[in-house]
Image: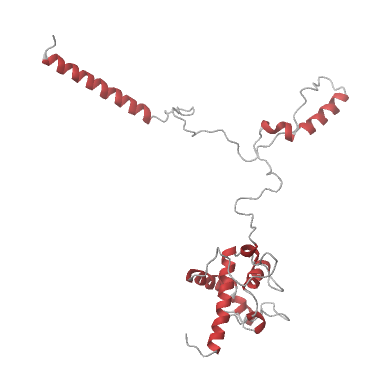
Amino acid sequence: MRTPDSTTRRIQQVARASALGLACALALGACQGNRADEPPVHIWWQMDGQKHFEAQEENDFFYSVDCAEEEARIAEEQASSHAVGFDKYNPPRTCFARAMREPPAGTVAVGQLKNDDHLHQGRDVSGRLVDELPPSVPLTLELLSRGEERYNIYCQPCHDYTGSGNGIVTRRGGGFQAKMPVNFHTDYYRAMPLGYFYDVIKNGKGTMQSYGAQIPTEDRWAIAVWVRTLQQSRTTLAMGSTK
């Protein structure tokens, strides 16, 4: 029959053993490696060390695709020459398969399909220039503010802040001779649809080069809206409004 003291000691021993075991387990779980010249001990990989190929690295998986034709030709040529010590079944390797692969024909990067002509071309399905914003580019105060900012960066040096075509580049020469920057406030340009200004920004026109590489799609629409705002402000002032 156990005494109370022996039972207490037994409980204490079990508790100490459990605590020691738990401490060892925690210490083992915290180990990621030991100091050594060799790669560290990695107990739980958790996909940390997956095999991968660097750019332009060789990958024999594609050897039959990249090198079979060349290797067969070289083997045939060398075998027919009766070269001493040549093994036609193990010809010297002169071709190495690539890990980097060319994408299949017709592959389009994610987000680069650009099949929305209204958004990306400024035209409707029939190819005519549109006179409204795409559904994905709503008219907001933020869009107007962005359009003013981008216009002042890219357009005002030639067209000036008001769109009259008398910017600092124009006033100082800028190489303009027979063809000056347009005045957006003439009847001709006031009648142009919104998509016209988008198209000119993207593709250029006359002596104006394309700004497609410098100005992204949404900013082109923002600038087009700001040009229309400048036109309407001039018309409003001409009608005598003070707003």
Using residue 203 as the reference point, say whether residue 87 is left or right of it: right
Asked where in the image residue 96 lies, by quadrant, the reply is top right
Task: Give the percent coordinates (x, y) of residue 140.
Answer: 49, 70
Question: Which one is nearer the viewer's eye here, 68 or 193?
Answer: 193
Question: Which one is nearer the viewer's eye here, 162 or 80?
Answer: 162
Question: Which one is nearer the viewer's eye here, 136 or 225?
Answer: 136
Does 62 sit above or below residue 192? above
Using residue 99 as the reference point, say whether residue 84 is left or right of it: right
Most extreme residue toward the front is 126
Q: Residue at x 55, y 74 (%)?
A: 152
Task: Give the percent coordinates (x, y) of residue 213.
Answer: 63, 62
Task: Give the percent coordinates (x, y) of residue 74.
Answer: 82, 30
Asked where in the image residue 83 lies, by quadrant, the reply is top right
Most extreme residue toward the bottom is 240
Task: Give the percent coordinates (x, y) of residue 113.
Answer: 64, 54
Asked where in the image residue 192 lies, by quadrant, the reply is bottom right
Q: Quadrant of the N terminus?
A: top left
Q: Residue at x 66, y 69 (%)?
A: 199
- Residue 213 visible in the picture: no
Does 108 sit above or below residue 21? below
